[in-house]
Structure formats: structure tokens, C-alpha cells
Amino acid sequence: MVDRDGAFDGRDDDKDKSAGRTFGKSGGGGGGGEKRSSNFSRRKMCRFCADDATSIDYKNVAMLKHFITERGKLVPRRISGNCARHQRALALSVRRARMIALVPFTVTGK
Ligand SMILES: [Zn+2]
């Protein structure tokens, strides 16, 4: 009985120590949450509005490729960050570029 009691006491002490350690670690986790929130609030501006030099041109394939997925689809506005006006102009340019085979309509797997 006495032996058992002693063992229990030792265990309890150990638990207390580890709990203190965990508490300190969770404080560091709070910093991680802060990092995540900053990533979440990242807002993209329409790059055509921001820079007048960047014009939407159906012959500029390098520029169009930025707004086309690997499968040949147009990147949605909420992802690309374009404004409605420029997204529409971009879609028109992509359609023209597709017509003259500068960009693919679709990319099918093997
Ligand atoms: Zn714009």
C-alpha cells in the first residue's frame, strides 16, 4: 500500500512538469496563428489597373499564360485578382489567342 502511494506521488509530479512545458509551447503556437492570418488577408490588386504599361493583348502569349491554368482554363477573377473590366478584356484576348492557336482550348491528359 505504502509502496503504491509513493509511486503515484512521483507520477503526479511528472505530470505537473510536462503540463508547464506544454503551456509554454502553446504560446509559440499563437505566433503561428498570426502568420496564418497575415497570409489570409493578402489581397491582390488588378495588375492591369496597377500598371498602365501592362496592356491586354491577344498576341502577348507570355502575359496570357499567367491567367490560364495548366489545363488551358481561364483563371477565375477571385484567384487572379483582376477587376471585372480587365477580366472581361482578358477573356476576350484569350478567346482570340485560342482562335489563332497561340494558347490551347484545353489540355487533355496523355
Ligand atoms: Zn483592372
Image (cartoon, rainbow, N blue to C red):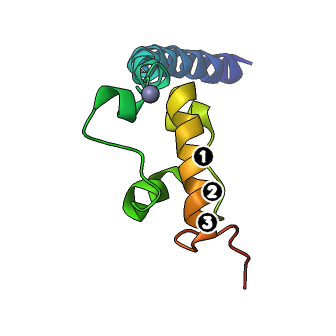
The quarter holding residue 51 reads: top left
Q: Which residue is mark 3?
A: 98
Q: Is residue 28 left or right of residue 68?
A: left
Q: Are marks 3 and 2 in contact (CB under 8 Å)?
A: yes
Residue under pointer 2:
95
Q: Is residue 69 visible?
A: no
Residue 109: image x %, image y %? Answer: 73, 78
Label 2 sits on what residue type? Arg
Distance of mark 3 from mark 1, alpha carbons? 10 Å
| Quadrant of the frame with the C terminus | bottom right
Query: In the image shown, does 62 or 12 lie closer to the viewer?
Result: 62
Q: In the image, 56: left or right of 11?
A: left
Give the alpha-carbon distance from disc 2 to disc 1, as whole Å: 6 Å
User: Who comes first in sequence, dot 3 or dot 1?
Assistant: 1
Residue at point 70%, 68% (across, down) = 106
Quadrant location of residue 61?
bottom left
The residue labelled by disc 1 is 91
Q: Is residue 61 above or below residue 17?
A: below
Residue flagged by tag 3: what amino acid is it?
Arg
Q: Is residue 53 above or below residue 101?
A: above
Q: Residues within 10 Å of mark 3 (few under 14, many from 20)?
A: some
95 vs 42, left or right, is right
The front one of 24 and 107 is: 107
**Tags 2 and 1 in contact by the CB under 8 Å rule?**
yes
Looking at this rendering, what residue extends furthest in the bottom direction? 110
